[in-house]
Image: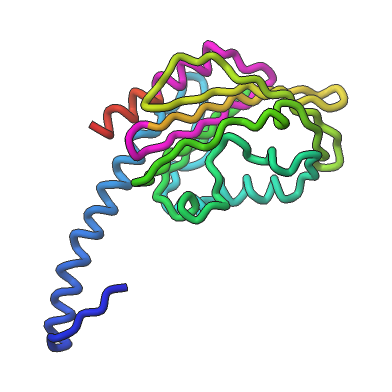
Amino acid sequence: MMVVAGCSAGEADNQAAGSARPAASSSAVEAARLRAALLPVPKGMRIAYGPEMGAFGSLKSTQEGLAAIQQAKLERPECAGAAQLDAAKPEVAQAPAAVIAFSAARGSITQAVVSMPSASMPAPLPPQCALYKATVEGADVTYRTAKLAMPARGDESRAYLTTASGGDKRAQIGSVVIRRAHLIMSMLVVGEKVKAAGLYELARLADQNLARVTR
């Protein structure tokens, strides 16, 4: 909120309108930059959601992710969302972001790009989160996560591969986080089997977009 003193109401209105235009323009430019940083539709997939833009914590996909975590019963609660962007932190929740999701019979890809002036990478996966159990929708699920030797991307980057198994069901989740300048890109790839080579290629393409919009 801005308080303008020492001028008439008409002058205040004119000054407010004048100051609002650059702010709106700045927001529009940042939104366009974030949108341009998102991946195009991968071959054989379709857009399942988005692109949606706004404060990261207010986005539909973020809210659904938080709700899913709250409904699950984790053996180690600190592992929920570990090594990922934490929407529970105000500076992350309020940051401008763009999100898109793709899907196909073989799996899905969800990508988020968040803009933070004091951008910092999410902390690495805690050792105790490499193996833990949870109850999800009444089913017992075991999560095993390994750090991947992904080629370095951006200013900082990390990648993990998680295998979730329970009963006769099994799925894998590949996760990548890349920081380049003030932008942080987070990507989740879910499928019956996620290949490291495919994950690395998606990371390369995502970082290529980040490099283009941060020049």
Up-down relation of residue 89 to residue 36 (above or below) = below
Quarter of the image for the C terminus: give it: top left
Q: Residue at the location (35% across, 34% down)?
A: 37
Spot occupied by residue 117 in the image (x, y as percentages of width and height): 34, 46
In this view, the residue in front, 94 or 209, is 94
Spot occupied by residue 108 in the image (x, y as percentages of width and height): 58, 28
Quarter of the image for the N terminus: give it: bottom left
User: Residue 200 in magenta?
Assistant: yes
Q: Residue at the location (81% across, 24% down)?
A: 169
Q: Residue at the location (81% across, 39% down)?
A: 75
In this view, the residue in front, 110 or 155, is 155
User: Residue 71 in magenta?
Assistant: no
Spot occupied by residue 197 in the image (x, y as percentages of width and height): 53, 11
In this view, the residue in front, 181 or 170, is 181
In this view, the residue in front, 34 or 121, is 121
Left or right for 115, reference 67: left
- Stretch in magenta: 180-205
Q: Residue at the location (41% across, 19% down)?
A: 204
